[in-house]
Amino acid sequence: MLILLLTNCSYLNVFVAGELFLLSSVIFLLQVVSGCPEKCRCRSSSSFVDCSQQGLVEIPSDLPPQTLTLHLQDNQIHQLPAFAFRSVPQLTTLNLSNNSLSNLAPGAFLGLQHLRVLNLTQNSLLSLESRLSHSLPQLRALDLSSNNISHLPTSLGEPWENLTIFAVQQNKLQQLHRALLESMPNVRFLFLKDNLWKCNCHLLGLKLWLEKFIFKGQ
Ligand SMILES: *[C@@H]1O[C@H](CO)[C@@H](O)[C@H](O)[C@H]1NC(C)=O
Ligand SMILES: *[C@@H]1O[C@H](CO)[C@@H](O)[C@H](O)[C@H]1NC(C)=O
Ligand SMILES: *[C@@H]1O[C@H](CO)[C@@H](O)[C@H](O)[C@H]1NC(C)=O
Ligand SMILES: *[C@@H]1O[C@H](CO)[C@@H](O)[C@H](O)[C@H]1NC(C)=O
Ligand SMILES: *[C@@H]1O[C@H](CO)[C@@H](O)[C@H](O)[C@H]1NC(C)=O
């Protein structure tokens, strides 16, 4: 099923709803017991680490290496250095919603080969680097809603094969290149509303892509 609402040209509302994407949350019951960072709460042998709402300004340095889900939402983290999550290479879900991120160092997410869900909503991001797709080959859901993004890459180079959910609602986007959408061949949920879409020929690529998307019956 697909629902498409194009109210007017300046506000493009697109909801693409399909078969509900179920995140296959494989919980590895690791026997390894290790410490929990001071401001965090750890559960399930530290595979779930909750450091939300602790006034953190940076990523805790002593995260358990077996962490699968990391909650860092509702803090004041303002920057991510390269390889910020190198100590937690198994991570599948990372929540950085409602922090103070305005830019991400190139390669901030490098090493997260298994990450499936990345929530960056409610930050102050201005742009997105195209290399993100190389860092996160397994990513299923990327939520960039409620940021300050005015530019997205024109394309990602190679296809971001596993990406199913791409959300950029409530940003400052004026255009979206068709090549970018084409580099997400399996996207099923696209959240685009509340941007500054310019009703000119630059938006034509999006229109053409959407027509093909609908035609494919996704
Ligand atoms: C965002 O996080 C702050 C704490 O840093 C909290 O006070 C505030 O309620 C959060 N906002 C939302 C919308 O959750
Ligand atoms: C991330 O945190 C926000 C705010 O607490 C919450 O609404 C959302 O469900 C979380 N998402 C994930 C994937 O954990
Ligand atoms: C990200 O967090 C927001 C709340 O800040 C929530 O509404 C949204 O559903 C989350 N996105 C994903 C993909 O979990
Ligand atoms: C968004 O960016 C503009 C300049 O590009 C800046 O003036 C404004 O403070 C930013 N807003 C937020 C919420 O970061
Ligand atoms: C997409 O996910 C599948 C299943 O987890 C994995 O085998 C495949 O390598 C991923 N694709 C890429 C480009 O990494």
Image (cartoon, rainbow, N blue to C red):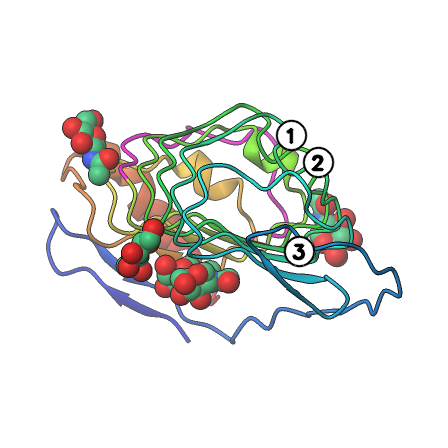
**Where is residue 2 drawn, in percent x and y?**
38, 71
Left or right, residue 35 beside residue 191: right
- Cβ atoms at labels 1 and 2 below 8 Å apart: yes
Q: Position of residue 189 (x, y in %)?
A: 43, 61
Residue 103 lies in quadrant:
top left
Whether residue 147 is situated above or below residue 118 in the rendered picture? above
**What residue do we see at 60% from left, 51% from top?**
38
How crowded pointer 3 is (Cα within 10 Å; few <14, some 14-19, many 20+) is rated as many
Q: CA distance from mark 2 to mark 3?
A: 13 Å
Q: Is 26 drawn above or below residue 202 in the view shown?
A: below
Residue at 45% x, 35% y is 179
Distance between the alpha carbons at the discs numbered 3 and 1: 16 Å
Which numbered circle lies on residue 83?
1
In terms of image quadrants, where is residue 47?
bottom right
- Magenta stretch containing residue 58, yes or no? no
Residue located beneath label 3 in the image: 92
Residue 172 shows in this picture: no
Quadrant of the image occupied by residue 85: top right
Q: Quadrant holding ligand 4? A: top left
Q: Secondary structure at mark 1?
A: loop
SS assignment for the magenta stretch, majority: loop
Q: Mark 2: give few (<14), some (14-19) or many (20+) Cα within 10 Å.
A: some
In the displayed structure image, the side of residue 205 where residue 89 appears, left or right: right
Tag shown at residue 17: none
Q: Amino acid at mark 1?
A: Phe
